[in-house]
Image (cartoon, rainbow, N blue to C red):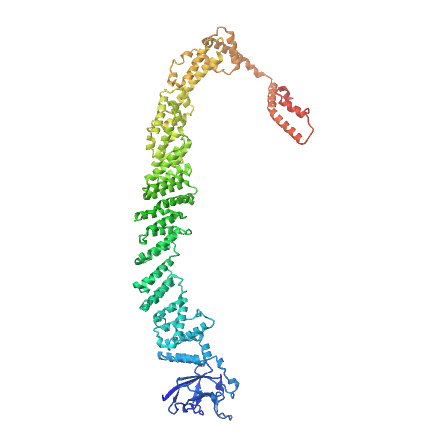
Amino acid sequence: MENNIFTFHVHLPEEIEKCGQPVVIGNVKELGLWEKPIVKLRQPFPQNPTYWQSEPVVISFLNVQVNDDIKYKYAIHMPRSYYGREEKIVFEGNYDSDNRILDTVRSDQFCIWENNFEINQRFHINPNMINDFAFIDYVFNSIKSPDDLKDKIMIYQYLLTHFKDLTIRTSSLKFIFNRLEDKLQEKRLFLCLVLGYFVQRQKMGNYRHYKLPPTFPSQCLLEAFEDYKQETLPSDTKEQMYTAITTLVQHNAFRMKFDWLIIFTIATEVDPGYTFLDRLRALKYSSDNLLTKFIKEAEMIKIYTEGIELETYVKLAKWLIQLCHNMDSLFKLWSNVLSHNNVFDQHIFKCFIDRVREDISHDDAVALEDHFKRLPKAYRNDFSYVFRDHALFLLESPNNKWTNPNINAIQSLLQNENLNWHNEEIIQSLEFISKSQSFGLLNIFPEILDGWFRSDFSDTKKRISTICVNWFTLLLTKLDTYEKNLSNESNFIFLVFQQLERMYPLLGLRINIWRDLTGIAIERVNGCSESRIFAATKLVVQIKQDDIKKLFLDTVKEILSKTALRTNDQLLNKIFTICGCKGEALEVPNLLSEDILCYIMIKLQSQSIASDPSEYHLDILGASKFWNIIFRATGNVKNLHSSLFVQRVRMSVNELGGLLCEKMIEIQLLQQLLEYSDEKLFQHFDAAVIKENDVIISRDEITELRKLYDNYQLQLEILFKFYTRFCSVVQVTDVNCYIQDVNQNRQNSSKLKLKQILLSDYWAFHEKILDSARRCYEFNKSQTFRNIFDACLQEDAAATKVEYIAQNLVPIVFEKYNGICEQFKEWENLKSYKSQMFVQTLDQLSKIPHWVERLEWLEKVIGLFEVPHNEYDWLSKSIRTLKDDSMKLMHLNN
C-alpha cells in the first residue's frame, strides 16, 4: 500500500471560523509536517454548523516506517492581520498526548474537537451536546451504488462503537422519516438497518412490544426489499435487519396494507422458518372487501413457497386459513394461493374444515344455504357434514328467529341430496322440528318427512311414530293459539284437517301412526264449540282427499248422533251453519254439506214416533218452517230431496192437502190444522209441491175450509146453548136426547169427515129446532131475556117437549121481551143530577186503596218521630173505616 485516500470529518465548536480557518495538520508531508496548514476543512452541510469536512487527501506511505504512526490534529489557522497579529496555528487539545493517530484501515476519519484552553471558552465544544451530529448523514449521502452499501453500514457500525450516544440519538425515526424521499434502494436498505437498531434498542428499554407509529410510511421501506439478498449487508447485521423487516411487516399489515407481502419473496433468505407469522397472529381483515383484496394480492405467495419445509408450509397455510372469515375467500385461498399434495392436504385439511365450521358458525339458515350453494362442487362431498351439523344446530337452538326466508332455506337444506344426510341425522332433524316453538317450522314437517320417505330412509328404531305424535300435538297447540285463529275456531278446525291431508299420503298406510294422529286431531276438534265445527264444513270441502273429508263427516255425525234432534229453529241454525248460509233461504253449497244434511234426515227419521197419520200430519205442520226451508233448498240437494225421510214428509204433506181438497179430512184434524194461519197453511202445502207451478191447495180453498169448519162449530154451539140454557128444566122430558146428539157429534170429530157434515140431511134431527135456537143464541147472555123465558116456561104446562118450546114458546117469549124493551126507552129521561152523584160515588170508591196506603205511611212517620198516638184518634179510626167492607157507599161522598 503506497498511497491511500483519506477524508477527515470533525465536529468543531460552533462559529469557530471566526477565530480562523479550521485545518488538519500532521506529521507527514501531505498534512503539513505540523507547520503548514495544507488540508483545510469546509462545512458541507449548512444545516450542520459544527460539522467540518476535508477534501479527500492522498497520503503516501513510502516514506513512513512500518511501525511508525501518522499523527495529526485539528487546528485553527490564524493568519497574520493588518493590525499586527502574527500568524498562528492553535491546535486542539493541550498536550502532545492529545495527538490523533491516523486509522489507515479506514478512509474516513471521524473525530470531535478536543477543547484548548488558549481559545476562548465560548469556542469550546461539549461532545455530548452536539445537536447537529452529521456523521450518519455523511454516511447516508455517500451511498451511491450497491457496492457502497456494505462499507457504509460498517462505517455506521464504527460510529455506533466510537460515538455511541450521538449515533443512537441521531438514529431516530425522525432521521429515517426525513430521508424516505430518497428512492435509491441501497439508501432505503440502510434506513431499514438503522430502523432495526432503533427497534432493538426500544425493546431493550421500556418498549418490549414496540410498534411503529400509525402514520409511519412502512410501505416505502418495504419496497426496498425487492430482490433483497442478505449477502448485500455485513453478516453481523442479520438480526437487526430481521427486526426491521418484521417490524415493518407487522406495521404495514395491521394498517390493512398489502406491501408487507413482499416478505414472502425473501422469506427463504431472511426467515426460512416464517417466524414473522407470530407477529401477525392477531391480524384480522374485518371487512369482506379487504379480505378479498388480500386473497387476490396473496396469490403471488404460491410461487415463492414451493419447496419450503412441510412443517413451515403447514404453519403458513393454517395461518392463512384462519384469516379467511368468509367462504368465498377461504376457497379462493385453497384454490389459488395454496399448493397441494396428498401429504400436505392430510396435514392441513382438518384446519381447513375447522375454518369452514367457524365461518358458518354464525350463519342463519339463509346464509348457510347460500354458502353451500357457493361451495365448489369438488369440495361438497368433503364438507357436507359440516353444513349438516350446523343445520341441526340451528334446528336444535330454541332462540333462533325462524323467519319465512330462514324456514324456506332450512327446508331446502334438509331436502338437498348433495348434503348426503344420514339416517340418524334425518331422525334428529325431524325430532328437532317436532319440538320447535316456531309454527312456520312445524308447518314444513310433512314436506321434510315426505322427502325422507322418498329416499332410502329407514326408521330401524321405530321413532317416527313418537316424533309424528309429538309434532302433531304441538302443531295443533300452535294452530289453536295462532294469532289469526284466536277468534276463528272454524279456521283452526279446517287447518287441523288440512294438516291431516298433508300427512295422509305419507302416513295413511301406516295404520298405528295414522290412528294416533287422527285421534289427536279429533280430540282437539271436539274441544271446539259445536257451531264452529259445523261452520268449518264450508272450509273442509276444499280438502281433496276423500278419506280426510270422511273423517270430518264422521266427526260431525258423531256430534249429531249424541244429540236429540228436533225439527225446530235450533236445528235450522245448525243446518244453516253447516251450509254457510246467512239469509232465510237454504242453499246447500257442496256434497259434504249435503251428506251431513242427509244424515240429519236419517237421524230425524229414526226419532219419528208419530202413532197415527193425524199426529204425523200435525208434527210436520208444527215443524212447517223447518220443512219449508228443506223443500225449498237449492244447490246440492239431489240426494237430500231424494232421501226417504224427506220424500216421506213431502208425501205426507201432499196427502194431507189431498184430504183437504176432497174434504175427506176428519173434523178434529181440521180443527187442529186451522189453529194455524191461512198463510202458514198455504206455505206449508206450497213448499211441498213437487212440480213447479203445481198447487196442492189454494189460499181461497183454505179460507173456504175455515168457513165450513167455523159454521159447523157455530151450529153445534147454538144448539148446545139452546138445549142447556133454555130447555134443561125438569118439565122438558126429551132435552137429554138432543144434548146427547150434540155431544156425540163433538166426541166423534176424530172420525167425522168434513164431507159428511156438508150433506143436506146431516142436521135432520135438529132441523125443527135450529131457527129458534139461532134466535135465542143472540140473547144468550141477557138476564132479562132469560127471566122472561123462564116465566113463560113455568106458565105453559104444555111445554114438556123441546120441539114444542122451539115452535110455540119461543115466539111468545120474544113478543114479551120486545114489549119490555120499549119501556126501557123511558130511562133516558132520568134526572142528570142522579147520574152525577153515581159517577162521583164510583170515583171515590176507586180511591180507597190509595187513601189506606197513605194513611199507613203517615202512621209509620208518627212512630218514627214518637208523636203521641192511640187506637182511638182520627188516624186509627180512618184506617179501620176504610178497610171495613160494611161501609155504605153514601158515606164515601161525606
| Extreme residue in the top direction | 798
Q: Up-down: is 431 above or below 53?
A: above
Q: Up-down: is 413 above or below 824?
A: below
Q: Up-down: is 135 above or below 631?
A: below
Q: In which quarter of the image is the N terminus?
A: bottom left
Task: Point out residue 73 in the picture as x, y percentages from the top left corner.
Answer: 45, 88
Res. 540 visible in picture: yes
Q: For the point 41% across and 27% down, which residue is it? A: 622
As rendered, which of 214 and 847 lies closer to the eye?
Answer: 214
As rendered, which of 696 and 136 lies closer to the eye?
Answer: 136
Left or right: 852, with 655 as reference point: right
As rendered, which of 526 and 299 lies closer to the eye?
Answer: 526
Task: Point out residue 676 in the picture as x, y percentages from the top left corner.
Answer: 42, 25
| Extreme residue in the right direction | 868
Res. 335 visible in picture: no
In which quarter of the view is residue 860 placed?
Answer: top right
As rendered, which of 275 and 189 lies closer to the eye?
Answer: 275
In which quarter of the view is residue 44 placed?
Answer: bottom left
Left or right: 791, with 571 as reference point: right
In which quarter of the view is residue 56 placed?
Answer: bottom left
Q: Quadrant of the C terminus?
A: top right
Task: Point out residue 633 in the picture as x, y percentages from the top left corner.
Answer: 36, 32
Task: Point out residue 607 in the picture as x, y percentages from the top left corner.
Answer: 38, 28
Q: Up-down: is 286 above or below 393?
A: below
Left or right: 170, with 337 as reference point: right
Give the number of marks: 0
